[in-house]
Image: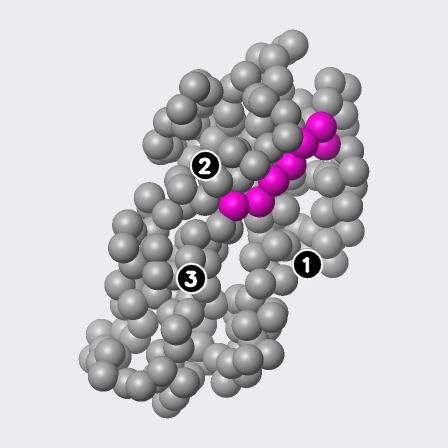
Amino acid sequence: MLLPYLEPGRTEAGCDEAGRGCLAGAVFAAAVIFPPGFAHDELNDSKQLSEKKRYALRPVIEQGATAWAIGMVTPEEIDKINILNASFLAMHRAIEQLTAQPEHLLIDGNRFTPYPGIPHTTIVKGDGRFLSIAAASILAKTYRDDYMNALALRYPAYRWDSNKGYPTQAHRLAIREFGVTPYHRKTFTLLSAGGQLSFDFRYK
């Protein structure tokens, strides 16, 4: 059973990101505030849930939350500021869109760039410990999956509908054969050692 809060009586927003380890696509983040007394036995870290279960839980989270929001950072931005900073920026963008003001932020992980005016606590594997962070992980994952599924219709060779931009063998083979797209992260190692991709490839 996940914990409903870190400190009783305080308005807390759980935050998590999705897509940090991908070769392509934006990184997404979500922030979720639940009202006092909210509970749901099936909420868990998104990585522990099936795709079907994640999508089934999304409306439960959205309807049950006091406030929720999504933030994203583009591949171009990721290349400019690096993926760690991009993950923090995506969380900031989610937090700034919340319709209710949290008193404290619960951040999944061990590092975070402070959000102005709101204290935070970083929690390693927090998505498996706190309801609000688990909910944020589910929203970030499902909204990012929607985004990658839409891109997959435009770039079917890369199989983003199944790999979601992660470095699978099929994805790397497609990069080798067809080159990079405008959605690939150019500062990432897109091919493994010995098959390094040259960015002289034209965009498809």
Color scheme of the displayed model: one colour
Q: In the image, 116: left or right of 34?
A: left
- Sort mark 2 into few (<14), some (14-19) or many (20+) by Cα contacts within 10 Å: many
Secondary structure under tag 3 reads loop
Say whether residue 70 is magenta. yes
Q: Are marks 1 and 3 in contact (CB under 8 Å)?
A: no
Residue ID at (73%, 54%): 55
Please report the bounds of the magenta region as a residue range: 65-71
- The amino acid marked with disc number 3 is Cys
Residue ID at (71%, 28%): 66
What residue would you read off at disc 2?
A: 92
Q: Alpha carbon of mark 1 to alpha carbon of mark 2: how far? A: 26 Å
How far across and down, in percent of the image, does residue 160 sit? 53, 73
- The amino acid marked with disc number 2 is His
- The amino acid marked with disc number 1 is Glu
Q: Alpha carbon of mark 2 to alpha carbon of mark 3: how far? A: 20 Å
| 47 or 189: nearer the viewer | 189
Of marks 1 and 3, the one in the foreground: 3
Q: Is residue 167 visible?
A: no
Q: Are marks 1 and 2 in contact (CB under 8 Å)?
A: no
What residue would you read off at disc 1?
A: 51
Q: Tag on residue 22?
A: 3
Residue ID at (61%, 13%): 10
Q: Is residue 62 visible?
A: yes
Q: Alpha carbon of mark 1 to alpha carbon of mark 3: how far? A: 18 Å
Give the farthest residue toward the top: 9
Q: Earlier in the sequence, mark 1 or mark 3?
A: 3
Give the farthest residue toward the bottom: 177
Residue ID at (43%, 19%): 117
- Sort mark 3 into few (<14), some (14-19) or many (20+) by Cα contacts within 10 Å: many
Secondary structure under tag 2 reads helix
